[in-house]
Amino acid sequence: MLYVVIVLLLFILYLYLDYRGPAYVKLKVVSNAEGKYQKAKELIVQEFDHEGNLWASRGMILYCQKKGELNYKRMAHIPTGLSFYFLYNFSLFRRLVNKPECTVATITGDRYICAMSAGFIWQSPLEKPKFKKVFTLRHFGMGVGRGIFSNGILSVGQSQVYFGEYFRNSNRSDVRIYVSRDSGNTWMVAYEFSAGKIRHVHSIQQDPYDRRLWVTCGDLDSESIIIYTDDEFKTIHEIGSGHQGWRTCQLVFTEEKIFWGGDNGEIEYSGIYCWDKSSGKVSKICKIEGAILYGNKLSGGNLIFTTDREGFNNEFDDKTRIVLIRPNGEVSLLHIGSWKYAKKDFRYSFAMLRLPRNQVDNILSMSVINQKEYPMGELLTFDESLVEKLNTNVIKPIKYEKTSISI
């Protein structure tokens, strides 16, 4: 009997410590033939804030890696309310269901946290975290959808925050973009797509060069749209729609151009596209098999895209890859991992290489999700100098006239 009590007490202690999370998450240095990189146990990258600090989450806990530092510091614990989603606080449950992506969070310029969990938006000052529930999502939950996609929340300036609705939307109802102008305290509709126009919002981003706000949507041909606004959604401008070449989940900005990877399963339209800001012309840079969910630009000029695995027709194996486009236009592919849980059961999810929502550094940080070679949600961090050494499967930039698209 005493043995059972001791085991039970130790288990309760473990759950408490797991719920609380370590005060610091240390990056472990790993060496390979090309050089050294870092890794950390289960950290899901969120974003670089306005000061260049990188934020990540472990379950419902937010961590921050301050610019120039190596380790992540525990900053806040996002609530779930009295709901089933409370179980996501525990690593045992997250491993059981294979779901390390539990929340999306952004940091405002005036240092407030806005986070989505359990179908609610929660707001808290960063300095002394104390969350309050400020908004209830219209569409969220099992069988309904995630509520907000990982790229679908954005902090602008000091106190503006946007998010777009992301849900299954089988009935093709209206889809909204919301805005808060007081650091997430109150919310209003910034723009509404009428019923049948789109399925859901994939991303909301700001071009760092001209400050325009950009929105990408999916999923069917007519629902795949890329738009921008210069006036906080009073008016919008569509640069293209109508087929799977316009279906994407993250734009990558340079001073002259905008790049994106096709989030689709069609061999004809899979690959990386480029829109010239001056001419408005769109071209296909290269053909990449599989869908591309994430992309970023490193400070040295290298463009990074990552392919996922989700069972599309244009997937010729089970491997995820980094796509590296160098400033000279050369394209390289690097195999990272292979799909782990592909069976359609409660552990099923895509195999992904998740990147931060924005990129302001010479460091490539990504979270590896649902892949055999890595623990759940492992964070990998590469210096750009190491990324530039990647030369496996070099392919030439090409333009496919049959799939090039123009405005």
Image (cartoon, helix red, strand yellow):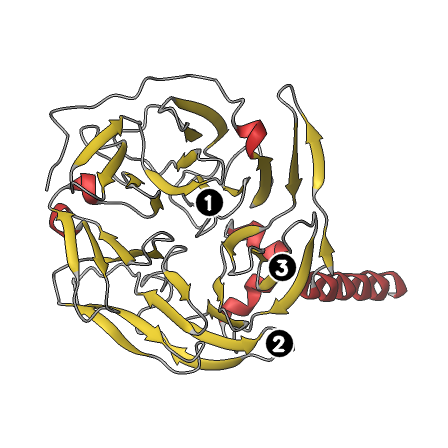
Q: Residues within 10 Å of mark 3 (few under 14, many from 20)?
A: many
Residue placed under numbered mark 1 in the picture: 354
Q: Please tell me whether residue 166 is drawn above or below residue 254 in the rendered image.
A: below
Give the side of residue 28 with respect to residue 174, left or right.
right
Give the image location of residue 240, x and y in percent. Answer: 14, 47
Q: Earlier in the sequence, mark 1 or mark 2?
A: 2
Contact between marks 1 and 2 (CB within 8 A): the answer is: no
Give the image location of residue 254, x and y in percent. Answer: 35, 42
* Residue 88 in view (yes/no): yes
Q: Please tell me whether residue 100 is drawn above or below residue 80 in the rendered image.
A: above
Question: Secondary structure beneath disc 3?
Answer: strand
Name which quarter of the figure residue 325 lies in. Answer: top left
Query: Mark on residue 129?
Result: 2
Q: Residue at x 64, y 75 (%)?
A: 127
The kind of residue tagged 3 is Tyr
Name the foreground residue: 62 vs 226.
226
Contact between marks 3 and 2 (CB within 8 A): the answer is: no
Residue placed under numbered mark 3 in the picture: 63
